Image (tube, rainbow, N blue to C red):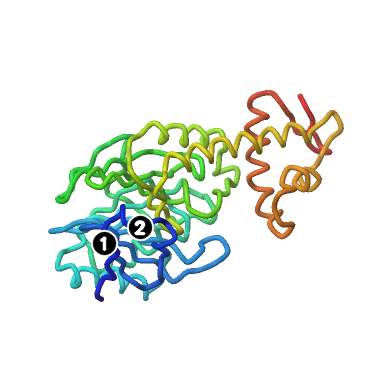
């Protein structure tokens, strides 16, 4: 596989860097993207697998358990003439970590790094068993440079972003992405934790975001600021829609999300519910048998 060079980060904007499934794209010196062939409404073009390194290679978010994608990742070793020694996971959703087990069959000595799924959780990848569970802000020394773990619960409790110190790139998994906001699905998804994690990475210094889906983001702090404001604006709409008369989720979603297409209401209800649970913990609303009311 010959990498498609995209030269330097600074010479491109996000529209120039669309992921292409099955194509190894060189994003910068020793930093590559390989998009998995799992396009969908939720994943866009597919899950972005990133490869970083020179004399040894680190894989970030191996992706779904697709044999073709696993073979593409493994072939990068020949293309770049270096072994894969580390496999990082941002979280254990089924489109991000299951391919790790396929890679481990050929790479038994590779070190898996991330936070495993909690037991008995549905829709989680329980095959991901890391050799190292990182602590927040832990720095992992790698042959090409330092990799820092930034624990970012919210999308799910075990979510981790990875900061490549050399390039000033934050790999955000499903914490932030280009082109859409992240869906927060309770109970694993937590809106309070999500906003706190956004505020946390807002204080960090980095130059761009490499998301788990979509193209690179060249104005990262602008996007983070917009996302925080968007979430609080949505929360304000939730409060405006609730009164002393009970309102079920189906009634609330049409007023709180009146700015989105109706076919998106089913997805929007998840984030709406996450907002309501946050407000309930803050003693601003409460749930009754008939729906949600002001507290």
Cβ–Cβ under 8 Å for marks 1 and 2: yes
Q: Position of residue 169 (x, y in %)?
A: 31, 47
Residue 221: name its quadrant.
top left
With 27 as the anchor, is 283 left or right in this view?
Answer: right
CA gap, disc 1 and disc 2: 9 Å
Nearer to us in this view, 186 or 192 = 192
Q: Position of residue 146 (x, y in %)?
A: 21, 43
With 55 as the anchor, is 246 left or right in this view?
Answer: right
Pick the quarter of the image with the C terminus.
top right
Q: Which mark is residue 229?
A: none
Looking at the image, which residue is at 32% across and 55% down?
Answer: 60
- Which residue is denoted by mark 1 in the rendering? 7
Q: Position of residue 121 (x, y in %)?
A: 52, 50
With 243 as the anchor, is 36 left or right in this view?
Answer: left
Position of residue 243 relative to residue 213, above or below, is: above
Pick the quarter of the image with the N terminus.
bottom left
- Which residue is denoted by mark 2 in the rendering? 12
Looking at the image, which residue is at 20% across and 72% down?
Answer: 79
Q: Secondary structure at mark 2?
A: loop
Looking at the image, tell me whether mark 1 or mark 2 is earlier in sequence order: 1
Nearer to us in this view, 89 or 210 = 210
With 178 as the anchor, is 59 left or right in this view?
Answer: left
Position of residue 25 relative to residue 137, above or below, is: below
């Amino acid at each position: 596989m010959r990498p498609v060079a995209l030269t330097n980060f600074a010479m491109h904007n996000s529209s120039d860097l669309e992921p292409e499934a099955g194509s190894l794209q060189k994003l910068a010196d020793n930093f590559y993207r390989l998009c998995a062939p799992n396009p969908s409404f939720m994943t866009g073009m597919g899950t972005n697998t990133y490869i970083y390194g020179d004399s040894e290679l680190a894989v970030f978010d191996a992706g779904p358990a697709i044999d073709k994608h696993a073979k593409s990742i493994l072939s990068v070793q020949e293309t770049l003439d270096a072994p894969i020694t580390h496999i990082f996971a941002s979280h254990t959703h089924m489109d991000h970590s299951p391919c790790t087990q396929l890679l481990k069959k050929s790479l038994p000595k590779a070190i898996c790094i991330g936070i495993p799924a909690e037991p008995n959780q549905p829709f989680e990848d329980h095959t991901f068993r890391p050799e190292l569970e990182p602590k927040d802000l832990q720095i992992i020394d790698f042959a090409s440079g330092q990799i820092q773990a930034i624990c970012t619960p919210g999308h799910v409790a075990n979510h981790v972003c990875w900061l490549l110190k050399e390039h000033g790139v934050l790999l955000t998994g499903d914490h932030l992405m280009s082109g859409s906001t992240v869906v927060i699905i309770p109970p694993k998804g937590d809106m309070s934790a999500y906003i706190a994690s956004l505020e946390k990475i807002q204080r960090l210094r980095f130059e761009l975001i490499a998301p788990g889906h979509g193209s690179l983001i060249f104005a990262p702090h602008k996007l983070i600021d917009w996302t925080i404001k968007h979430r609080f604006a949505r929360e304000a709409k939730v409060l405006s829609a609730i009164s002393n008369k009970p309102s079920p989720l189906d009634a609330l979603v049409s007023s709180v999300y009146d700015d989105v297409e109706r076919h998106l209401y089913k997805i929007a209800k998840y984030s709406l519910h996450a907002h309501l649970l946050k407000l309930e913990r803050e003693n601003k609303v409460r749930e009754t048998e008939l729906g949600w009311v002001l507290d």
